[in-house]
Amino acid sequence: LLFVHGAGGNGEIWDAQASAFHGKHAVFRLDLPGHGGSDGRGEDRISDYAEWVRLAAERLFGSKPFVLVGHSMGGAITLELSLTPPNGLKGIVLVGSGAKLAVTRAIFQMLSENPEAFFESLDRFAFSSAASRALRDRILRLTRQCPPALIFDDFKACDRFDIRNRLHEITLPALVLCGEEDQLTPLKYSRHLHENLSGSSLVTIPQAGHMVMAEQPDLLNHAIESFLGTLKL
């Protein structure tokens, strides 16, 4: 399992998945360039991130079978990579993502002029009403590790991304996951993916927002495990 985080994140967002799948599957959590422990300046195009992930997958797996799991921007990267999949990629999991990820101008303005307002907006919109204060604070601490200028470029990459007219080219088995209370990539985005990706399945997670992997890890992990059981590896 190769996990790819979203804009402004790092591999720590997948802590609950790494713990749950330990001993069952080989788990790798990427830090994209400039994020977490990775050097570099980041990218402002999804296609550039996708090529970075392709190289990482080739070095990690060669032609051995693997499944790519991407959240939000990581889901866009996963979709981009799936158009010309690397050897060994047997399935994809798209978590709180979409085929088009338009970003409101207010996000760019906050990141340029008042980053603290951006982090406050995440607290309001990235979680379900059921998310605890401790969970919110942990995710926000993780996001604050990323420089605002790098987050700005991540969102620029998201805003440029649109492969709605190419989804039919993706033939890999796909699991589409979304929190029912996701305000950042609403459920309609995941439904569109499911309706346009042949052979996909859609699972919605109750009492979860955009950070579904941390808000309802058991439900998300069970959905991934069930999906893995359907693959011919």
Image: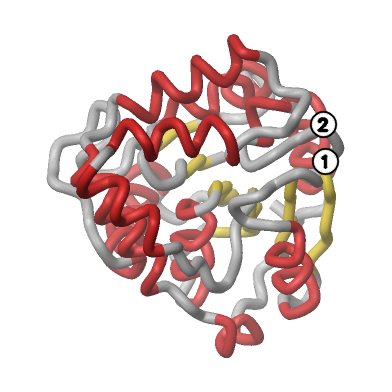
Label 2's element? helix
Identity of the residue furthest to the top in this view = 134
Marks 1 and 2 in Cβ contact (< 8 Å): yes
Work out whether residue 232 or residue 83 is closer to the camera in this orientation and state it: 83
**Is residue 155 shown to the viewer in this render?**
yes
Q: Is residue 31 left or right of residue 168?
A: left
Q: Residue at x 40, y 68 (%)?
A: 159
Q: Is residue 183 above or below residue 138?
A: below
> Could you tell me residue 117's position as x and y percent?
37, 36
> Could you tell me residue 58's position as x and y percent?
35, 53
What residue is pinned by disc 2?
219
Label 1's element? strand
Along the polypeptide, which appears first: circle 1 or circle 2? 1
Q: Amino acid at mark 1?
A: Ile
Question: Which quadrant of the figure has residue 200?
Answer: bottom right
Q: How much space separates mark 1 and mark 2, taking CA atoms? A: 7 Å
